[in-house]
Image (cartoon, rainbow, N blue to C red):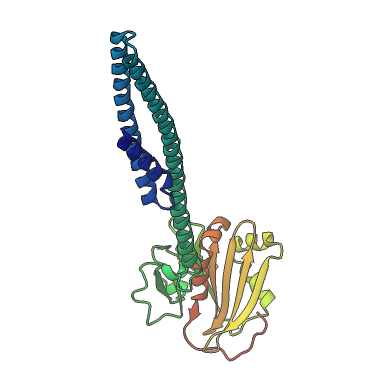
Amino acid sequence: MAATATAMSMSVACTGSSGISSRAAAQSGRSTGVAGLLNLAICRQNLGRVSFGCRAQSSSMGTAGESASALAAAVGKVRGWRSTLDSLRDNERVSMVNSLEDLSLESVADKLEVVTSAMIAGALVLFFMLAGPCRASAAEAADFTLYYGTAASASSYGGYGGNTNKRDSAEYTFEFPTGWKERTISKIEKGTNGTDSEFLNPKHKEEKVYVTYLSGFRRLAPMDNVLNNLALSDPVLQDILQLADGNITAKDRTDASGQLYYDYEIDSPVAHALISVTCAKNKLYAHFVKAGNSDWTRDQELLRHVHESFSTIGDVPLAPPGEF
């Protein structure tokens, strides 16, 4: 019995000394504590049997003097051992509860650490995707098709077909997003306002690009006059200008060949417009990119690419800007 008590004391001591500095130590302490509780239960059960046997023997002997007194003393010792075992069992249970609580807290902390690490890693990946120098813009990621415009007269204009046979006779080029649809220009449109080509976004038809031209112009007029004169033959442009309330940006640029362009950006409550105007081959060319405000907010990078891609082909006029 003394050996069993010693083993139980060692088990309790072992459990009490086990730390929770690591998961392995916590699990080992929990296993040891469970074994200790089982040993205590078995010992208490055996002591209960001894106590019961002693009481039964004492009852059968009645008042037989010393033998009865010895048995009574044995019963008292057994009861003392049972009290000690009960105390040890209670202490063991408290130790086990504390160990399990610490283990649970450690598990929660580990999970929080993993989640936090994953969130930080995800944030870093997103940051480098958005801010990294290798991130492709919407315009760079899109596919574009190069269009060749001939600026043919209304009398010789067929109005049908693509651009496969236009390269040799082209007078201007621009890029449009692949997937946009070409609208067939009627001879009446070509004869009245000089519309030569037009492409629409089939999903958002307010997004469009088109080119007009007028013959008989060797030079550009002053920048302010050009835009107002263009609006005379374009009712949509008139509306945009009237509602723009001064939100118009105008600048000039010269390309590598010396060709002079006027660039306009108009921001109005109804639409957004980008316009490039230049003179070449005794003609005035105007390249328009238009979009509704919601479409502009979504696709402005792509639309700016279309605007900047416009270029004329041929002789550069030597005459400086003058009267329109």
Quadrant of image for the C terminus? bottom right
Residue 322 percent across, percent down from the top left: 67, 84
Q: Residue at x 37, y 67 (%)?
A: 160
- Image point 29% across, 13% down: which residue? 56
Q: Identify the residue at the far bottom of this view.
A: 318
Q: How many marks?
A: 0
The one nearer the camera, 67 or 50, is 67
Q: Residue 266: tell me if it is visible.
A: yes
Residue extending farthest to the right is: 246
The image position of residue 217, as x and y in percent, is 58, 82
- Give coordinates of residue 183: x percent, y percent: 43, 62
Q: Nearer the viewer, residue 179 or 220?
A: 179
In percent of width and height, residue 223 lies at: 67, 77
From this view, report whether residue 183 is shown above or below residue 29.
below
| Quarter of the rendering containing residue 88 | top left
Is residue 253 left or right of 191 when viewed as pictured? right
- The residue positioned 53% from the left and 67% from the top of the image is 289
User: Which of these two is toward me, 73 or 293?
Assistant: 73
On the picture, is 229 further left or further right than 122?
Answer: right
Quick one: quadrant of the N terminus?
top left
Q: Eyeballing the image, is 3 above or below 285? A: above
Residue 232 visible? The answer is no
- Residue found at the very far front of the displayed protein: 66
In the depicted structure, whether residue 180 falls above or below residue 74: below
At 46% from the left and 54% from the top, the residue drawn is 113
